[in-house]
Image (tube, helix red, strand yellow):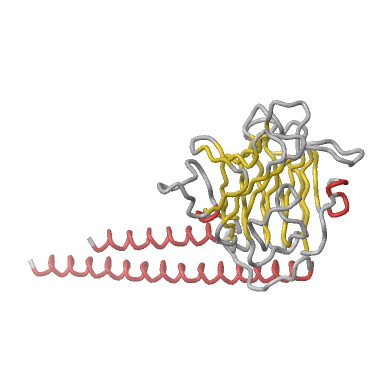
C-alpha cells in the first residue's frame, strides 16, 4: 500500500515536470476573445448583438451573412465592436465574400482597429484622418499604374494623415499586395491578421484553394496600435456596386509561455535583444531549479523506500528467530 502511494507520488511529480517543460518551450498559445468574435446567428434572442453594433445599409441574414453593402449604388455600412480590443497580441481571422452581378464593380471594404468607432466617412464607408490601423480590400482601380486589382493595402493612421482615394492610398501605404481572384472565388475567402507588439504584423489570405494561406505582407517592425482601439468593418459603393459580406469573425488573444521580463521600445532592436537575453537566462534558471528540485524528490523517496525495505527485512528476520 505504502509502495503504491510512493509510486503514485513519483508519477505525479514526473507529470508535473513534463507539464512545466511543455509550458516553457516558447510556443505561441491562444485564448478566444468572445467579445470580438462574431458567428452565426450573429444576434441574440432580442435581435441585438451583445458585442457589436451595426449601422448604415447593413443587412443581417442570421443563417448566412452580415451584408455591409448590397449590390446597389451609393451604399455604406458598418460593423463595430462595442468594447475595445485590449489584448497586447492578437489574431483576427475573418471569412468574407465579395460578389455581384456586374462586370464593373466597386468599391471594396475595410477592417479597422482604431481609436474611434462608428464614424461614417469617405474611406470605404468610414471616417478619414483615423488613428490606428486600417486594412483595405480595394476592388476598384482609380489611378494606380502598374498595380493589379483587387488590391489589399494596410495604412497606419496618425489622426492627421488623409487617405487619397484618387491614387488608391499610394502615399500612405504601409504594406500591400495584389489579390486577383479574391472576388467571386470558388472557395471560402478569408484573411488572417496577426499582431505581436514590437515583433511583427502579418496578413495572410485564403482565396486560391481551401486551407492554403497566401502571405500578403509581413513586417518585423509593426506599427504602434492605440491602447484603446475598437475592431470594425465597413464598406462602400459609389456609382459601381458589389455585395460585401462578413461571414464570421474569430478573434484570439495570443501569448507565449515565457513572457517578457523587460519591455521593448516599439521598433527597437536593442529592446528585442535584451528581451531575448532575459528570456534565455530565465529559462536556464527555471530549468536548472526544476531539475534540482525533482532530483531531490527522487533521492528522498529512494532513501525512504530503502529504509522501508530494510525495516521489513529486519522484522521478518526477527520473527524467524522468535519461532
Q: Is residue 162 left or right of residue 108?
A: right
| Most foreground residue, 59 or 91 | 59
| Most foreground residue, 115 or 34 | 115
- Which residue sits at x=46%, y=68%? 295
Q: Percent x, y for residue 112?
A: 68, 53
| Image: 122 above or below 7 | above
Where, quadrant-wise, is the C terminus in this rendering? bottom left
Residue sticking out furthest to the bottom: 262
- Which residue sits at x=22%, y=60%? 1
Q: Percent x, y for residue 127?
A: 72, 56
- Which residue sits at x=47%, y=46%? 43
Q: Percent x, y for residue 102?
A: 73, 26
| Quadrant of residue 316 within the rendered picture | bottom left
| Image: 23 above or below 48 | below
| Most foreground residue, 280 or 115 | 115
Q: Percent x, y for residue 21?
A: 53, 60
Amino acid at each position: 500500500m505504502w509502495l503504491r502511494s510512493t509510486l503514485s507520488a513519483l508519477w505525479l511529480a514526473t507529470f508535473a515536470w513534463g507539464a512545466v517543460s511543455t509550458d516553457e518551450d516558447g510556443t505561441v498559445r491562444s485564448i478566444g476573445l468572445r467579445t470580438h468574435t462574431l458567428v452565426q446567428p450573429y444576434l441574440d434572442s432580442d435581435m441585438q448583438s451583445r458585442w457589436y453594433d451595426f449601422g448604415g445599409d447593413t443587412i443581417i441574414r442570421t443563417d448566412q451573412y452580415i451584408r455591409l453593402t448590397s449590390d446597389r449604388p451609393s451604399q455604406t455600412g458598418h460593423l463595430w465592436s462595442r468594447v475595445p480590443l485590449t489584448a497586447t497580441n492578437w489574431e483576427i481571422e475573418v471569412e468574407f465574400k465579395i460578389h455581384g452581378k456586374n462586370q464593373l464593380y466597386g468599391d471594396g471594404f475595410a477592417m479597422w482597429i482604431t481609436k474611434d468607432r462608428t464614424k461614417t466617412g469617405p474611406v470605404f464607408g468610414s471616417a478619414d484622418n483615423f488613428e490606428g490601423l486600417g486594412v483595405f480590400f480595394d476592388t476598384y482601380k482609380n489611378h494606380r499604374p502598374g498595380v493589379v486589382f483587387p488590391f489589399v493595402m494596410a495604412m497606419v493612421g496618425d489622426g492627421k494623415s488623409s487617405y487619397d482615394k484618387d491614387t488608391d492610398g499610394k502615399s500612405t501605404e504601409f504594406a500591400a499586395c495584389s489579390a486577383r481572384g479574391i472576388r467571386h472565388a470558388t472557395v471560402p475567402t478569408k484573411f488572417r491578421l496577426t499582431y505581436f507588439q514590437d515583433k511583427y504584423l502579418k496578413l495572410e489570405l485564403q482565396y486560391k484553394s481551401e486551407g492554403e494561406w497566401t502571405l500578403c505582407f509581413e513586417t518585423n517592425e509593426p506599427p504602434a496600435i492605440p491602447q484603446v482601439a475598437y475592431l470594425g468593418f465597413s464598406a462602400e459603393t459609389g456609382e459601381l456596386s458589389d455585395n460585401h459580406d462578413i461571414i464570421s469573425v474569430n478573434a484570439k488573444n495570443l501569448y507565449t509561455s515565457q513572457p517578457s521580463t523587460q519591455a521593448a521600445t516599439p521598433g527597437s532592436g536593442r529592446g528585442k535583444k535584451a528581451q531575448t537575453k532575459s528570456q534565455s537566462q530565465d529559462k536556464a534558471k527555471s530549468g536548472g531549479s526544476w531539475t534540482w528540485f525533482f532530483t531531490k524528490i527522487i533521492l528522498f523517496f529512494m532513501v525512504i523506500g530503502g529504509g522501508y525495505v530494510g525495516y521489513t527485512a529486519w522484522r521478518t528476520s526477527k520473527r524467524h528467530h522468535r519461532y
